[in-house]
Amino acid sequence: MAKQKTVLIIEDDKSLSHALADILCPKFSILEAESGEKGVELALSKHPNLILLDLLLPKMDGMTAFKEIRKDPWGKDVPVIILTNVNATDVKLVENMVTNKPLFYLVKVDWKIHDVAKKIEDVLKI
Amino acid sequence: MKLRNKILLLGLMLIFFCQAKVALAQVDTTNAGFVAKVAPGELMPISVKLSNFGAGRRVDVEIKYAILTEASEEIYVSRDTMAVETTANFVKTVQVPFDTIPGIYIAKTTISYEGQQVPVSTQFPFTVERKILGLFQDDFLRYAGVIIFFCILMFSLGRLFVKRRNTTRFAPVDYSNIPRQNRIFYELISDTVMGMRQRVGDAALDIASRTNGLVIDEKTGRVLKFTESPSKVVAQLVSGYEKVLGQKTSFFFRKT
């Protein structure tokens, strides 16, 4: 039997994180982190197959965490989906986004939780 | 209701070849096999021809019109009396009772006159059928079927057309001719404009064309060039969509 793929959810909103985990857990192994710092630590140690990343996080913000992950040889190609409330109206944010290239930059208000889960499944080809 | 429109119902032709002497009376009908259709409560015209009556003198003829069920039960009867000298042609209208149950009926006409020795009658079958919106039920169902078929056909063709149009209209634009380091911005902005166009229509193109530093084809949405920092253009475009349309912007990065 093939090893279950792992999804790391870096999200400080516990209710959202748990809801996503509930939807995804039958198909994937789920890791959860509530801060950018913890997210980077889990990413670099567990090497998940996909990372779902919020931008507004305590201790280390999401974009900084994203850069840290991309710096690692393993992390430079890992698929990352940004799921945030931040609309990309800031030039610096756009530059960082283009430099680090997430698969998707999804604004939470426009996306239902099941659609986000479907996107993850599509990326991981389940 | 015009009698000409009831041409299907002009069924009965009584031809009485009667001579002055009763013993020579003859009957002929020419409507055999002709089936008409009426709705309950409608008038049904019956064309009547009487001929060869009398020899210069009038004969009083009583005409009985009846509508019979297939089991020969009378559901309608009326009588007229008229004086016929030699011939008479007229159209008699009888009203089919409102409570007539749909089915096949017989319109039977019988004449009697003084000194008659042989019963003279003629008849023809007709159908009673309900009407829906002025059309006979059968016709209504037939037309409704045809209309539904064409509606489904038009709906399917319409959907196919819209799908095809959207496929071409919102298809990702190819920017392989753009140098690699700048291509990501062309693709990002182009896909963002197309995505927003799908959501809000051509207003997305208008806003994109008014964005500082961005030059696009106003018909197709193809990004032609940047005259400012591409990152700044992206931020301004996203800001424009939020301010004017109240829409947040998500991004999709193409695989390289």
Image (cartoon, rainbow, N blue to C red):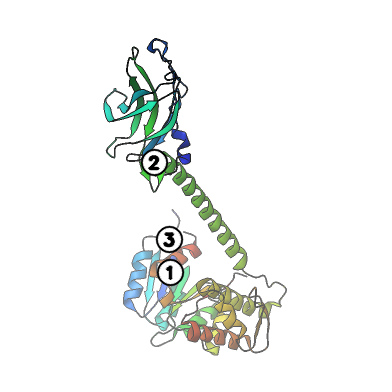
Q: Residue A27 appears in which quarter of the rendering? A: bottom left
Say whether mark 1 and mark 3 are on the same chain: yes
**Disc sitting over residue A28 in the figure:** none
> Secondary structure under badge 3?
loop
Question: Circle 3 sits on which residue?
Answer: A4
Subunit of label 2:
B
Which amino acid lies under the numbered mark 1 shown in the image of this protein? Val
**Disc sitting over residue B137 in the figure:** 2
Q: Earlier in the sequence, mark 3 or mark 1?
A: 3
Relative image position of residue B104 (x, y in whole percent):
35, 29
Residue A79 visible, this angle: no
> Secondary structure under badge 2?
helix
Q: Residue B89 appears in which quarter of the rendering? A: top left
Which amino acid lies under the numbered mark 2 shown in the image of this protein? Gln
> Between marks 1 and 2, how big is the CA–CA gap?
53 Å
Q: Residues within 10 Å of mark 1 (few under 14, many from 20)?
A: some
Give left or right: position of B28 versus A21.
right
Which amino acid lies under the numbered mark 3 shown in the image of this protein? Gln
Quarter the N terminus of chain B occupies: top left
Q: With respect to residue A72, does A20 lie above or below? A: above
Q: Count the marks.
A: 3
Q: Nearer the viewer, residue B143 or B214?
A: B143
Q: With respect to residue A115, does B243 lie above or below? A: below
Residue B157 visible, this angle: yes
Question: Circle 1 sits on which residue?
Answer: A116
> Which mark lies nearer to you, 2 or 3?
2
Quarter the C terminus of chain B occupies: bottom right
Look at 44% across and 71% down and name the residue there: A46
> Which mark lies nearer to you, 3 or 1?
1
> Secondary structure under badge 1?
helix
Relative image position of residue A24 (x, y in whole percent):
38, 65
> Between marks 3 and 1, how big is the CA–CA gap?
19 Å
